[in-house]
Image (cartoon, rainbow, N blue to C red):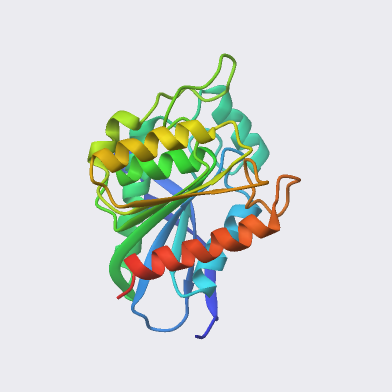
Amino acid sequence: MQDAIKAETVRISGHGGDEIEAYLARPLDSGPHGSVIVIHHMPGYDSATKEIVRTFAANGYAAICPNLYWREAPGASPDDAAAAARASGGVPDERLVGDVGGAAAYLRSLSSANGKVGVIGYCSGGRQAFLAACSLPLDAAVDCYGAFVVGTPPDGFPLQVGPLIDRAADLGCPLLGLFGAEDSYPAPEENAKLAQELTDLGKTFDFHTFDNAGHAFFAVDRPSYRPEAAVEGWQRIWDWFGRHLAA
């Protein structure tokens, strides 16, 4: 496989027709390629998330990350934009769905696209990946330790969001969930509750919980990074998207 890629900042049409910034990376060969929408974590549209986008491109996918905080702080640093978004209670669910829908349309418009689009999200983005998979026509989804799919934030938490488990019947694509056994948001018992709901509904999913790992175990630039869990988690992601997004 050739790993030459092109990465650039683009503008896409998001919720309500708003023009927002997004980071795109794609292989330089002619394809066809499956596509992946990367939903950034609560710290924002940062360099670590852009590296994930490039990783997907180097492995044969067109990938895009919409800047979900663009409206709150256009052109601001990731830290400042994340602070502005937290101050307003986070990204409204309806707006998230519109922005991810716009990202999917952009990916499908690429000449090298095979028409199949998946979504992956980390932290708050994991919850949003589940929401997108329940709201949009997608082909696969990955939830990396997304909190508050089950349950609600504690008092004083910066996100003003509600649980999504009541949307589980709307899940329209296969879902991979990757979680840490030492995480509190989401806690293992919450993941078990969601798994039981998806089983009862006959949905296609695969949940895996890593021992000795907590929240953000994929984050190579944070103390929470757990190499063993991250390496296995990435292999599970490649297997999942390889199965569901192939030409």
Q: Quadrant of residue 94?
A: top left
Instruction: Tell me what residue is drawn at x 40 percent, y 32 percent.
Output: 193
Q: Is residue 13 above or below residue 97?
A: below
x, y (%) of residue 190?
46, 31
Q: Is residue 211 above or below residue 235?
A: above
At a point 47% along the width and 76% down the height, the residue shown is: 27
User: Quadrant of the rendered structure where residue 37 is?
Assistant: bottom left
Q: Could one spot residue 18 in this view of the protein?
A: no
* Residue at the limit of the structure toward the right, as seen here: 223
Outermost residue toward the top in this view: 155
Instruction: Give coordinates of residue 121: x percent, y percent.
Output: 48, 48
Residue drawn at 59 percent across, 29 percent down? 84
Quadrant (top left/top right/bottom left/bottom right) for the C terminus = bottom left
Does 114 sit above or below residue 132?
A: below
In terms of image quadrants, where is residue 104? bottom left
Return the x and y of residue 113 as percentages of the image width and height.
Answer: 32, 72
Which residue is nearer to you in this view: 4 or 121? 121
Q: Residue at x 52, y 23 (%)?
A: 88
- Residue 148 position, x and y percent, is 46, 30
- How many numbered marks does the figure carry? 0
Q: Is residue 116 visible?
A: yes
